[in-house]
Structure formats: structure tokens, C-alpha cells
Image: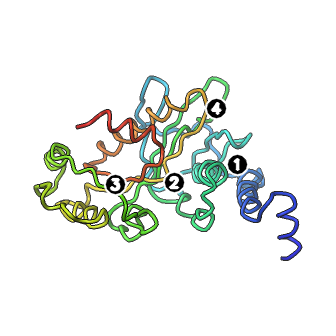
Amino acid sequence: YFHIEQMAIKVFGCLLKCSTEFEMFKLIHKPMSVLHRHLDVTKKNSTSAIIDEKYHYELVQDISTDERYFHTEFSEHPLPLSDAIVLINIATFIKEHKWYEMLNHLEISSKGEHFILYQYTDNNIYPTIISSALIQTTSNKHDWLFFDNFFQNTKWKPNLNADGLLSLSHATSMSPLARSQFVDKSSTEIENDLFYSILDKTRACEAIRLTISGEKSKANYHLYLAQKGLAMALKESGRDIVFTIIEKPAMVLFYQSMNL
């Protein structure tokens, strides 16, 4: 192990970068006989919705059981949906943004309900994934990153707009909300109060690990389509309120511009 670590540092600069590349390597270089054992190139989801003419979006209840194959920009050959999403998560969150903590939690991205946005191109028989996001129900709220201490800060100042709280109450199955009930409370207390104000917990969920891939020149356009498709897909599935974590300034500005 000492020699492996020394070689990893020599070649990659550190052990974490080596581990990241190794996880990507394992997904990309699975034996082709394993990858294509159950492949059916005609398998399509007839229930997917179309956005902007050529982009499809849908919610997949459990990606680990989905047998379709998808292209990604990180592999020359198509991968099973589950592997494709894990590969995109590693390449974007871990390799690009250096979120190495995710190396210990890759299995989260390999199963469960996910939103996917994809498109078919003239040159490929397999669709190409443009965006994905993990959807978690309230039944496993204890696993939500939204309420994890890692994503809390005592210096945060909540934005408690009265009109926003009113519209939130009207648009969702929540008990009435008033700005006064959140005064002098921490962000953690406010978020928990909001969650427990939801009358029907089945109409709430967490959406995290939103990835955007594809041509860099279309990054903002794909981000817009992904947010629009995700919002519509969740609304169509009966979700009224979504808890999420946003780190892209463009996404924050997008939602602020929509206001109510």
C-alpha cells in the first residue's frame, strides 16, 4: 500500500485524484461482454416527455433496475443508466469541483429515483444524458443532505419575504406561514419549521446532485432546460415543494428572477 500511495502521488499528485481516476476507469472499462449482455437498442421509454422539441425528460423510479444505455461525454461507448449517472457525478462533482467526500458515497448515485434529461442525435442509436438529479422522498429524510450539518452555517441570513411565504403556503399543502414565526431563529430551525409545516409529506422531496453536461457553449441553455424539466417532472409526479442545495450562482439568479 505504501508503494501504491507513492506511485499515486508521483503520477496524479495526490491519492484522492488517483482514486477519482480509478473509479472512472472502472466504469468506463468494464468488459464489453458485461456491458452489452442484456442490451436492447430498441428499448425506449414511451412515457418520457419532450421539452424544446428534441430533449426528453423523465423520472426513473430506480435507475439500478433500468436496462437502457446512454452516452456521456466522458466515455466513448454507452453505459447502463446507473453507471452513466455515477460516471457523470464523479467527473463533474469530484474531478472538476474536487468534492472528494463523495468518493465514499458513490452508491447513492447508482440507485433510487432520479430525474434525467437526454437527447437523441442523428449519429447515435443511444441517447446522450444532458442532466440528472437524485430525488429523495421524505421517508428517508434522515439521509437528506439539505438538513446535514455540513450544509449549515450560523452566519447565513434567511430571506423571509412575506409574499414568498404566502405564495408558498397557497401553492403547497402547508399550514399557514407567517414571517413572525421565523424571527430570531437560525436557518436550521427555520428549515425544520418549514418541513414540519407540510401537511402531506408525500408531496415533498429533496432534489440534489444536479449535473449538467454536454457542449460547454450550451451550458447555460442546458442548465435552463434541466431546471425547467426537473420542475415540471416533479410537479407532474405530485410534488409541491422541493428542498435543494444550490451552489451555482446562475441557478440562484434564475430562481430570483422568477420571484413568485
Instruction: Read off the residue under disc 4.
Output: 125
Instruction: Read off the residue under disc 1.
Output: 36
Q: CA distance from mark 4 to mark 3?
A: 35 Å
Which label sits in the foreground, 2 or 3?
3
For label 3, the crowd category at 10 Å Cα-Cα, with few meaning under 14, some 14 to 19 and many 20 or more, is some
Q: Amino acid at mark 1?
A: His
> Furthest-bottom residue in view?
1
Which label sits in the foreground, 2 or 1?
2
For label 1, the crowd category at 10 Å Cα-Cα, with few meaning under 14, some 14 to 19 and many 20 or more, is some
Of mark 4 and mark 3, the one earlier in the sequence is: 4
Q: Secondary structure at mark 2?
A: helix
Q: CA distance from mark 1 to mark 4?
A: 14 Å
Q: CA distance from mark 2 to mark 4?
A: 20 Å
Counting from the top left corner in percent of width and height, residue 216 is at 61, 31
Residue 63 numbered tag? 2
Residue 243 numbered tag? 3
Q: Amino acid at mark 3?
A: Phe
Q: Amino acid at mark 4?
A: Ile
